[in-house]
Amino acid sequence: EIVMTQSPGTLSVSPGERATLSCRASQSVSSNLAWYQQKPGQAPRLLVYGASTRATGIPARFSGSGSGTEFTLTITSLQSEDFAVYHCQQYKDWPLSFGGGTEVEI
Amino acid sequence: QVQLVESGGGLVKPGGSLRLSCAASGFTFSDYYMTWIRHTPGKGLEWVAYISSRGVSIYYGDSVKGRFTISRDNAKSSLFLQMDSLRAEDTAIYYCAARLTGTNAFDIWGRGTMVTVSS
């Protein structure tokens, strides 16, 4: 099983600042990585797939990068609606697996 | 409007069973691979089960293998999860989700249904 590890667990930032979230895979997942945003009481929303391709309707301030075992989600100029929990997911191998999440808070 | 609506959650005793349903609308359900994913505050998101568009390929997470069964009825645009031998650690919000074509990332999600396993 591929273990996904996200860091930090919590990221404290101010509106307008840049946030950098990390996700590490225990073995290579190539570019088979997705990022999701989840707000309290809501389902996750797909932000990025293929490590760097933004999903439909996702603002350009969200960008994904990386391949192999190291991945980054960058949110430039944080907006109030961006404060949420972010999850990474690998889909290279079965079982599919998620990281533990990073909470982006004010 | 593209929509997934889960139902069937509730309170059940350890060792009991529940059957979750997910009704799809606004898209051609029979074209989509589907999955169940659960969320607990302490453990985060956990992938549970996956079924291909015609039900030929099915996969399960290790923690539910042998206890849960995923199925679908394309004629009724519905996805199901039969959960048997439930344990306290199965307590979670269960989401159904549809796969983004060509990947195993999921871009259509329901609102979720809560399952609580407790005596």
Image (tube, rainbow, N blue to C red):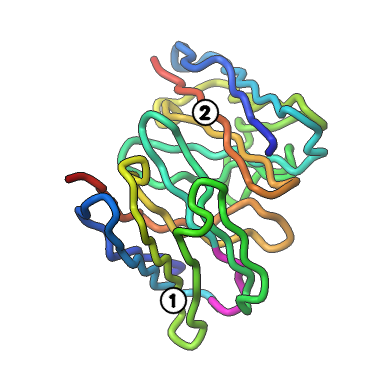
Report the quarter where the N terminus of chain B lies.
bottom left
Residue B55 location, quadrant: bottom right
Residue A66 location, quadrant: top right
The amino acid type, in three-letter code, at marker 2 is Gly
Residue B98 in view of the camera? yes
Taking the spot 71% from the left edge, 29% from the top edge, the residue there is A25
Residue A105 image label: none
Q: Nearer the viewer, residue A64 or B102?
A: B102
- The spot of residue A18 in percent (x, y) is 58, 16
Q: Is residue B53 magenta?
A: no
Q: Are marks 1 and 2 in contact (CB under 8 Å)?
A: no
Mark 2 falls within which chain?
Answer: A
Residue B78 image label: 1
Report the quarter where the C terminus of chain B lies.
top left
Image height of B60 relative to A18, above or below = below
A52 vs B10, left or right, is: right
SS for dot 2: loop
- Reading the image, the residue beneath label 2 is A100
Image height of B64 relative to A52, above or below = below
- The spot of residue B11 in percent (x, y) is 20, 53
The amino acid type, in three-letter code, at marker 1 is Ser
Q: Which residues are magenta?
A: B29-34
Q: Residue furthest left?
A: B119
Q: Is residue B32 magenta?
A: yes
Q: How many marks?
A: 2
Neighbor class of circle 1 (other Cα within 10 Å; few <14, some 14-19, many 20+) is some
| Callout 1 and callout 2 share a chain | no
